Image: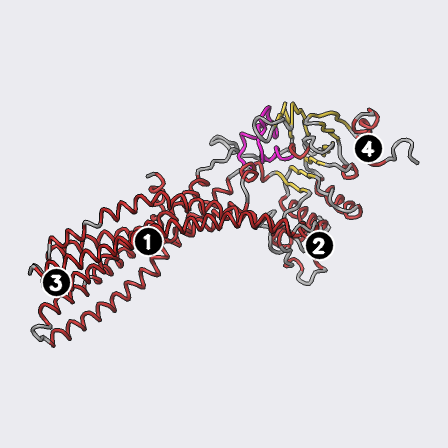
């Protein structure tokens, strides 16, 4: 009931159109009664008594009624579907807004393709349910009650025989409901998997071609595609069992009416005109049964999608700010790790253990060490992409958990090795750092990132399309856009996470100059694997297996002769004994 209540709550956005739809549908049902009723009148009175003038007048009235029905039918078919579309729109908007609140761990655990399927495909069936569901249920009830009352006045016994078929039809629908629901739910799961595999394969098409793995990708997609095919076949099998069973029961109903009516004619309890009306009404009577059939199918399909929608809506972010969270004023930029420990999954080995580090305002601190030492993890903890599992992390003396998330992240600029550019223009991607910036401010940021001259050389300048994920640009060009974006954001805190490690030496030097320009006057955390990128750092921290192994200036660490000295020698000097 709770799920149904939440579904009904979305009618608040379209209740006026919904009432209009029901009103027009009700008028259609009433007008549908006109033909069998008029037929009975023609056969019992007008035709036997040769009342030609009245027949012509009645025919004109019927035509006018059907013209009116045309208007009602158009309203139901168009505005009724608009009801579903607008409800789907609000559901999709709510779901997307909710996903924006989820933390990084949620996206670590869920495939992008599966989430896309839930946002788009699952809610599409909700449109049909939102429109046809209440309409079919309401009209089926109205038509059954109306037809029962009218037929009962003609012949109570035959009417009761007809309506004896309603309980077995209802029983059959109920018994098949669970099977259909399970089948359609499984279909939803498999279509999400197909979308996920498809998105993953197409996004990595260059890797597949470079490793000549097209056959592997075809086989992998074939497995998920086969499971999807099997799930859809099962869903249609359940639907066919349901539809065929209902058709069989309604055919039995026709036979019962024909035999029962024939017996009553023989006994003189009903005349041919009433029997003809009865047979016409049976055809009319089948409409609500078919509506109930359609409603059950739509309910199974639509509610399975809506339930998956609710599953995501019920997910709560693990990282959030309390109601008492503080706003940040002017940020000095002091960062302090106090006995910080962290593990990505509970029960696994700690990535960080007992880390103590204080970064002074305006200081540039480089964090180096071997892969897996915890460098990037430290960078992810500062903007609360993940939360520390032990100890606390402070900004200007305040625990970052007590600061509003928006305030915290708006004061941090991040440049990573793998720059993500949105499909759009260079202008769009730079302005992502500050959408309110004007043209002059944007170009100034690009100039400081040593990007402006390159952009001016392009035929379309800042309106040049960068392609999916910036595929039309080189690594260095994408990095410059990322740097310009942060220049435009102008945050007091800066995190540079392996920002130049994927570039060639010449480009690395040029980008490094831009980064050092960006770091001036800001508290900067510089994550690096290549020591050539940490020139200009005030202090160097060496991470080893999640702990701080050494700390100091480059001169101090080289004189110490420890881990940093060995790392330095491996990158800049030949090993001992080699000329």
Q: CA distance from mark 3 to mark 4?
A: 103 Å
* Residue 157 spot, x, y in % from top left: 11, 53
Q: Secondary structure at mark 2?
A: helix
Q: Secondary structure at mark 1?
A: helix
Q: Is residue 381 magenta?
A: yes
Q: Which residue is at the front of the view, 363 or 542?
A: 542
Q: Secondary structure at mark 3?
A: helix
Q: Which residue is at the front of the view, 102 or 541?
A: 102
* Residue 353 spot, x, y in % from top left: 65, 24
Residue tagged by mark 4?
Answer: 568
Q: Earlier in the sequence, mark 3 or mark 4?
A: 3
* Residue 569 spot, x, y in % from top left: 84, 32
Please identify, in this view, whether the residue under mark 3 or under mark 2 is nearer the observer. Answer: 3
Q: Earlier in the sequence, mark 1 or mark 4?
A: 1
Quadrant for the C terminus in the image = top right
Left or right: where 161 falls relative to 188? left
């Amino acid at each position: 009931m709770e799920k149904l209540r939440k579904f009904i709550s979305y009618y608040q956005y379209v209740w006026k159109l919904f009432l209009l739809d029901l009103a027009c549908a009700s008028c259609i049902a009433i007008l549908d009664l006109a033909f069998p009723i008029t037929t009975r009148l023609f056969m019992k009175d007008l035709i036997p008594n040769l009342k030609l003038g009245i027949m012509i007048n009645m025919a004109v009235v019927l035509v006018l009624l059907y013209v009116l029905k045309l208007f009602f039918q158009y309203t139901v078919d168009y505005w009724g579907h608009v009801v579903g579309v607008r409800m789907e729109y609000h559901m999709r908007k709510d779901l997307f807004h909710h996903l924006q609140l989820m933390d990084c761990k949620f996206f670590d655990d869920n495939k992008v393709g599966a989430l896309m399927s839930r946002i788009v495909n699952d809610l599409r069936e909700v449109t049909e349910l939102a429109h046809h569901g209440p309409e079919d249920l309401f009209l089926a009830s109205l038509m059954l009650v109306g037809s029962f009352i009218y037929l009962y006045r003609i012949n109570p016994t035959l009417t009761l025989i007809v309506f004896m078929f309603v309980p077995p039809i209802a029983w059959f629908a109920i018994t098949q409901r669970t099977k259909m629901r399970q089948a359609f739910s499984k279909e939803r799961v498999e279509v999400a998997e197909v979308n996920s595999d498809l998105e993953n394969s197409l996004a990595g098409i260059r890797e597949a071609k470079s490793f000549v793995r097209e056959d592997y990708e075809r086989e992998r997609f074939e497995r998920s595609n086969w499971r999807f095919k099997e799930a859809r076949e099962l869903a249609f099998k359940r639907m066919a069992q349901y539809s065929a069973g209902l058709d069989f029961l309604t055919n039995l109903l026709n036979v019962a009416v024909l035999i029962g009516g024939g017996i009553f004619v023989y006994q003189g309890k009903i005349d041919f005109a009433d029997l003809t009306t009865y047979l016409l009404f049976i055809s009319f009577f089948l409409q609500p049964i078919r509506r109930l059939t359609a409603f059950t199918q739509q309910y199974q399909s639509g509610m399975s999608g809506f339930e998956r929608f609710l599953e995501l809506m019920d997910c709560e972010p693990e990282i959030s700010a309390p109601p008492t969270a503080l706003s940040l004023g002017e940020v000095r930029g002091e960062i302090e790790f106090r006995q910080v420990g962290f593990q990505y999954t509970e029960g696994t080995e700690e990535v960080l253990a007992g880390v103590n580090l204080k970064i002074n305002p305006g200081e540039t601190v480089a964090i180096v060490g071997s892969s897996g030492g915890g460098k990037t993890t430290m960078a992810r903890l500062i903007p609360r992409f993940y939360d520390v599992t032990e100890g606390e992390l402070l900004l200007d003396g305040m625990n970052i958990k007590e600061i509003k998330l928006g305030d915290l992240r708006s004061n941090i600029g991040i440049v990573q090795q793998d720059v993500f550019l949105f499909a759009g223009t260079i202008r769009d991607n730079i302005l992502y750092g500050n959408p309110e910036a004007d043209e002059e401010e944007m170009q100034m940021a690009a100039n400081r990132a040593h990007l402006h001259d390159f952009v001016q050389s392009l035929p379309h300048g800042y309106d040049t399309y960068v392609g999916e994920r910036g595929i039309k640009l080189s690594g260095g060009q994408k990095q410059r856009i990322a740097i310009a974006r942060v220049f435009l954001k102008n945050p007091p805190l800066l995190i540079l996470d392996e920002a130049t490690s994927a570039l060639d030496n010449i480009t690395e030097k040029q980008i490094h100059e831009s980064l050092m320009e960006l770091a001036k006057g800001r508290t900067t955390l510089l994550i690096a694997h290549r020591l050539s990128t940490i020139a200009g750092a005030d202090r160097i921290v060496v991470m080893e297996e999640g702990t701080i192994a050494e700390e100091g200036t480059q001169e101090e660490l080289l004189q110490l002769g420890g881990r940093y000295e060995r790392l330095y020698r491996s990158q800049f000097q030949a090993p001992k004994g080699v000329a």
